[in-house]
Amino acid sequence: MRLNIVLKFFTLIVVSLCFLSACDNTRELRAEVIRIAHSHTRTHPVHLGALAFKEYIEEKLPNKYNIEIYPKENIGSNEKVLELVKQGSVQFLIVSSVNLESYDRSFALFSIPYLFVNEKAFESFITNPIIIKKLGVNVDKNGFIPLTAFFAGTRSFYSKTPIYKVDDLKGKKIRVQAGPFNIRIMQAFGAISIPMSFSDVYKALEQNLIDGAANNEFALVDEEHGKFAKYYSYDKHQMCPDMFIVCSKFMENLSKKDRRIFEKAAQKAQEVEIKAFHKGVHEAKTHALSLGVKFIDVNIDEFKEKVLPLHKEILYELPEIKDLYEEVLRFNKHELQKEQAQI
Ligand code: GCU
């Protein structure tokens, strides 16, 4: 009799535990799958930023969202995934501002060569929430919202043969991100622009379809472009952020509470990415040196001179970016004043 009671009690506990665990599993099954895509490796600052985003949301809203991160253009090139974000089958994408230009001309601001006086001005600009809001004014039309921006350093040329002066660019086939102003910039430098997606650059270098490209130092090692391009010249002609964008319908359908958590998560992601970028860029340079890449300091003024007239031309063609451009000038002035005060 006593044994019977003990057995029944034991069975009840086992059944209850199974039931609780089944509930838990269904809850997990019911968690909404959210996809984030980007074009970098799993060790790149962009991926670390995306991980921080995932961790924050899954911690604050347990079992509600299951965030999947797709690195290395695994689900398609940035250009293709942008369409999926607009439709809502991929909710988030981390993509260069240049790729957004054809959807929203405001992002062409960042293509303007030698726009920021230094990386500090660039960083304060892209970490300012008011600026991000201004960049998102065309939400309805675009179908995506810029949530935040990631720091992507400064773009300089790297090539198979050295570039010491502007003339060395003459006739060189340089891969650019597909954006109308990049083609004009290359023309002004005397180079031939070859637009292609980021994931195709490795093969294009390997097969001699291009002589070089432009990017920050990470591309030399993370993408292994340094295997073929052994000369990196610090002409520092562009600073384009990676925009963390979200499908606007997805964001609009979130509850107020969840929306706040997603926004906070994006802020955390930005902090993590920027920190990792500053730390990683030195490591990338050291690694590239060990691959035999030579870093060249050039006379930046000579390069600037060639493309500065584009400021006026671009502003004339895109009057809608005038306000943002003037904001940049304010940020530049502020940074220069800070620098002067430190001297
Ligand atoms: C940078 C940027 C990427 C971009 C790439 C490119 O690495 O972080 O988002 O795709 O440049 O040149 O295409």
Image (cartoon, grey):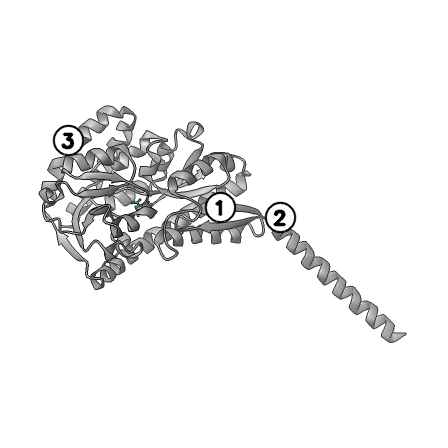
Three-letter amino acid code at the position of disc 1:
Arg
Picture quadrant of residue 188: top left
Instruction: State which tag comes first along the sequence, 3 or 1.
Output: 1
Three-letter amino acid code at the position of disc 2:
Arg
Residue occupying image coordinates x 19% and y 36%:
185
Q: Which residue is mark 1?
A: 35
Q: Position of residue 120 (x, y in %)?
A: 24, 46
Check disc 2 and report its element: helix, strand or loop.
helix
Residue occupying image coordinates x 26% and y 58%:
284
Of residues 7 and 290, which is closer to you in this image? 290
Q: Which residue is mark 3?
A: 309
Check disc 3 and report its element: helix, strand or loop.
helix
Q: Which mark is residue 85?
A: none
Picture quadrant of residue 169: top left
Instruction: State which tag comes first along the sequence, 2 or 3.
Output: 2
Total residue callouts: 3
Q: Which residue is mark 2?
A: 30
For residue 77, side relative to residue 188 (left or right): right
Q: Position of residue 235 (x, y in %)?
A: 16, 46
Picture quadrant of residue 295: bottom left
Q: Residues within 10 Å of mark 1 (few under 14, many from 20)?
A: some
Of residues 208 and 287, which is closer to you in this image? 208
C-alpha gap between disc 3 and disc 1: 41 Å
Three-letter amino acid code at the position of disc 3:
Pro
Of residues 168 and 265, which is closer to you in this image? 168
Residue occupying image coordinates x 25% and y 40%:
194
Instruction: State which tag comes first along the sequence, 1 or 2.
Output: 2
The residue carrying mark 3 has its beta carbon less than 8 Å from ligand 1 = no
For residue 22, side relative to residue 324 (left or right): right
